[in-house]
Image (cartoon, rainbow, N blue to C red):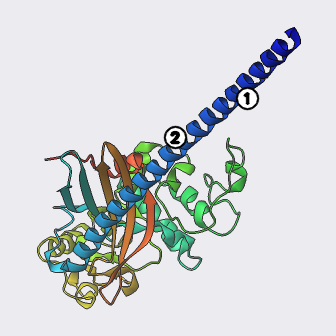
Amino acid sequence: MRERIQNKGVALIMALMVFALIAAVSATIMSQLARERSLISQLQETAILKQQLLGGEAWARATFTGMENSTLPSASEAPLILKKQSFNLDNEDDSMSVIMIDRQNCYNLNRLADEELSEQALQEVERLLTEIGLDKTLAEQLKDWVDADQNITGNTGHEDEFYQGLTPSFRTADSHFIAETELKLLQFTDKTITTLLSHFCFWPQDIGININRVSTQIIKSMLPGLDAAKESALLAQITTGGFSSLSDFINHDSVSGITLNEEDWRLDLALVDVFVDVTLGGRSMFLHSKLYKQDSGSVVSYYRAYGPNQQLQKWFGLTLKTTSK
């Protein structure tokens, strides 16, 4: 009798242990399912945010397609921002902001990577750095970052040996700049990068600076042979209507006696950067996109980077906080 009671007790304990194990496994499974549901929900929210961001980019593409060069403001009126638009979305606290900035009135640093242009470009970059109040020796570091060799430029250039001594270590790109954030790898300060980006840019190919929106500093760096009177005459023409053809520019009295390469200049806007900020359900996400208007007039995106990109916005001096109105 006592033995049967003991056996029942053992069986009860075993059953309780099994139930406890099942409960523990069930709890683990439920916890895992909850995490998976949360992850799926976040992925779905991210997908929706990305779609909304791409919608903002699509609006920018359509706007860029319809932009008439004759209606663009002068560089003195709007040196950077071409368009800024805020949108209210379905829910009261949801919103989207889009900013389009000009990347055609700046100097293409990727000229430094072109073997045929690199020495000329180095001098142009040095002059422009001086004009904007930066140390001209930064040009040597910029050239070494993009050129294909390991020969140190000047006295202050840096090749792989310098960057491999940093923590973490890395190598020079030995190729074109792609994104503005690369400048941080060159150990430049935020203040230096902010100043650089107001006058320099990275183009996928060298397609010419828009002479009708060019800055005084770039004029001086690209056309060092201009005296004060000719410089004033050229800037006056640019600010009072600009040029209607490259031939008009090249044959203008203000640049007489100066050898100009027609490929270095253009009259239209072909490159813009777009910053899109979307807030949905209290969650924000950002997109930095680069757009190119082809000769056919169609606009394509050749670069996209999803945020956060607040530091990049700060370098450009932009405010992209989405607020409901």
Location of residue 128 by image quarter: bottom left
Question: Is 74 positioned to the left or the right of 108 in the image?
Answer: left
Percent x, y of residue 174: 64, 66
Percent x, y of residue 155: 63, 53
Q: Which residue is drawn at 43% across and 50% down?
A: 193
Question: Is 224 positioned to the left or the right of 11 in the image?
Answer: left
Query: Which residue has dot 1 on it?
Result: 18
Percent x, y of residue 283: 35, 44
Q: What residue type is labelled 1?
A: Val
Q: Residue at x 27, y 65 (%)?
A: 215
Q: What residue type is labelled 2?
A: Ala
- Please identify the residue farthest to the top as the structure is shown: 2
Which of 308 and 163 lies nearest the eye of the viewer?
A: 308
Q: Residue at x 47, y 78 (%)?
A: 205
Which of 41 and 223 lies nearest the eye of the viewer?
A: 41
Location of residue 236 by image quarter: bottom left
Percent x, y of residue 256: 28, 84
Residue 283: tell me if it is visible.
yes
Element at label 1: helix
Crowding at dot 1, Cα within 10 Å, few <14 / some 14-19 / many 20+, comes out as few
Q: Identify the image quadrant of the N terminus.
A: top right
- Please identify the residue farthest to the right as the structure is shown: 3
Looking at the image, is mark 2 or mark 1 nearer the viewer? 1
| 159 versus 19 height, above or below | below
Mark closest to the chain's N terminus, 2 or 1 = 1
Element at label 2: helix
Crowding at dot 2, Cα within 10 Å, few <14 / some 14-19 / many 20+, comes out as few
Query: Which residue has dot 2 on it?
Result: 34
Which of 151 and 59 lies nearest the eye of the viewer?
A: 59
- What label sits on residue 100 in the rendered view? none
| 53 versus 121 height, above or below | above
Question: Is 67 positioned to the left or the right of 293 in the image?
Answer: left
